[in-house]
Amino acid sequence: MSAWREYSDCCRISAQDPEARRCGQCGAPLLRCRGFDHCLMILAPHGHCPVHMDPQLLVVAGTRLVARADEELDLNLRLVNPEKARAPLRISKVHKIEGNGEAVAIPISWSSLRPGEARKFPVRAERFGSGGRRLLTLVFEATVEIDGHEESYAFEGGIELDVKGRSDSNVNLNIHASDGARVTAMASGVDQAFAESLECLTEDLSVPLQRADRFELQRRIRGYVEDGLRVLADVELFWRGFPKPEEIPGRNPDQPFLVQDRFRLGRNRIGYVDTKHRLPSNDVCLRVYDPTTGAQDAKGSGEISGTHVELYLQNDRLMLEVTGQHGLIHNGKRVEQGHRFPVRDGDVVAPGSANAAPYLRLRFTFNDDGRVVRRIMIDRF
Ligand SMILES: [Zn+2]
Ligand SMILES: [Zn+2]
């Protein structure tokens, strides 16, 4: 079995060998970032690459983080995609959450940050009503594309605001700061002096961001919202019911899905590389056999493309892409070539042609621990 475990130095050394699937010393599966050549990162199954995906949020110098209870407070923020990311960062949505309130989408006038690019945007905090410390949380939906493959995540960061009620005579500031940004003096109890004497940041203030796991699930950014599950890169695949043992993965049948991998299923035998169509070897061979004699059915097999289906992981979901020209039947419905969809527990697929469909079906069964899908059984029947 191949459950992932925390990496050690031995794993980072082993990962430098591009052929190594596991650490030569401790045996841990090496889950490389798709952009490993650039970032040299091996990832936790639930993790994102901290080099390729590293948005940074700043409160811009000059912004005030102290407010009066009866005012709306405008904050100037800046989001940065560091140069080292080397990949554009697409921001599809920004939300604000005031206190324990609902997430409210806020408009931004841009959607993409090139490596090294920074963009400003304003956020207005509503009237507070009474004094005290208030948390303004910002949530970003961000997508990174590495090597043609997109992954989306949500990140959140909290900015603490100090709201001065009418009776307050002192104002205190407490900012979640990861750097030494200072805030100018405060401590005025006099209302009209408030706006002039308090408040403005003298330099940019960094707001630490972290993954917003629950938000990712609820907003269908990652995982399966209906059952609250995620399929991660260390999921184990079991292939059962194949008539010929050589048709299931030549690699370990229980090998984890490695992040950079696609599993290819089709008529071509495992190990055959189709140079004409530039198709790498299949991982699973799909052919049709006569149910009585066991002999290969040339007609049925011929309606299965060299590579007919590809499985891959994206956004903590098992995805299926139909590459075969005859398409696929998915839970009784036709899916044409080129389409892709998330596979769910209990799904049944078959090639989309009359001579193959009745004799070759695959059922996907998920085994989960309530949070993560640990195993996926793929039964041919
Ligand atoms: Zn190791
Ligand atoms: Zn990376």
Image (tube, rainbow, N blue to C red):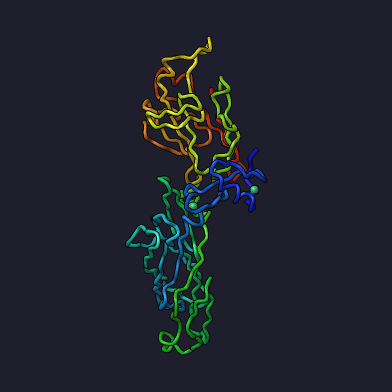
Residue 119: % across, % down: 37, 65
User: Residue 168 or 51: which is nearer the viewer?
Assistant: 51
The residue positioned 39% from the left and 72% from the top of the image is 76
> In the image, is residue 256 above or below residue 77?
above
User: Residue 146 or 129: which is nearer the viewer?
Assistant: 146
Residue 378 shows up from this direction: yes
> In the image, is residue 92 above or below residue 73?
above
Image quadrant containing the N terminus = top right
> In the image, is residue 212 above or below residue 64?
above
Residue 342: % across, % down: 46, 39
Residue that lies at the very extreme toward the left in this rendered image? 109
Residue 177 shows up from this direction: no
The residue positioned 49% from the left and 68% from the top of the image is 207
Q: Quadrant of residue 108?
A: bottom left
Residue that lies at the very extreme toward the front in this rendered image? 17
Residue that lies at the very extreme toward the right in this rendered image? 26
